[in-house]
Amino acid sequence: MPRAIAVFDIDGTVADARHRLHHIAETDKHENWVRFFDAAADDPPLAEGVARARRLAETYDIVWLTARPERLRPMTERWLAEHDLPAGRLLMLPDGERTLARRYKLDAVRRLAEEREIAVVVDDDPRVVALLEEAKIPVVRADWSGH
């Protein structure tokens, strides 16, 4: 019988994105999001998120779920490996997709739930957390990044 899944966001959950928030602070333009995500390679790890991911990986299969665009897959995989995070499936927003991150994540988690049991989703975005709670999906808000 396959193990249940622990779904982890990356930005603000295991990766400290605070140094790049200025790119999206004043406006929600597409170009600003491109700059925001392009700076992700320089993120320091968030100790609390990393520890939780490692701990949960002892019991569950990890699925990384991020709104980072697919074009950043090589950099994201490298970042996860460099910080000794558990291996797992990596789901990313398809390039050119303009779906809101929270809608993309909810849909992705629902698809995952059709395959396997979802033990928990860990995400820092209160809007994502609210949608998952409303859908009766077990979720923990990653509030340790301080943003």
Image (spheres, rainbow, N blue to C red):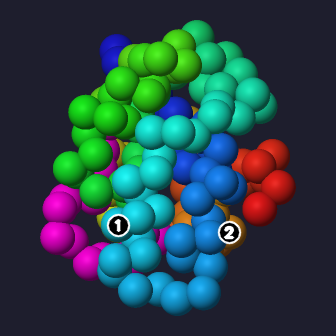
Residue 126, numbered label: 2
Image position of 54 with respect to 72: above or below: above
**Which residue is more in the foreground, 63 or 29?**
29
Which residue is found at the position 58% from the left and 59% from the top? 20
SS at mark 1 in the image:
helix
Stretch of the chain drawn in magenta: 90-103
Q: Is residue 93 left or right of residue 25?
A: left
Q: Do tag 2 and tag 1 residues touch (Cβ < 8 Å)?
A: no
Q: Which residue is mark 1?
A: 34
Which residue is found at the position 46% from the left and 51% from the top? 39
- Amino acid tagged 2: Pro
Which residue is found at the position 77% from the left and 49% from the top? 145
Q: Position of residue 117 (x, y in %)?
A: 43, 37
Instruction: Tell me if residue 61 can be seen.
Output: no
**Which residue is more in the foreground, 68 or 32?**
32
Which residue is found at the position 38% from the left and 54% from the top? 38
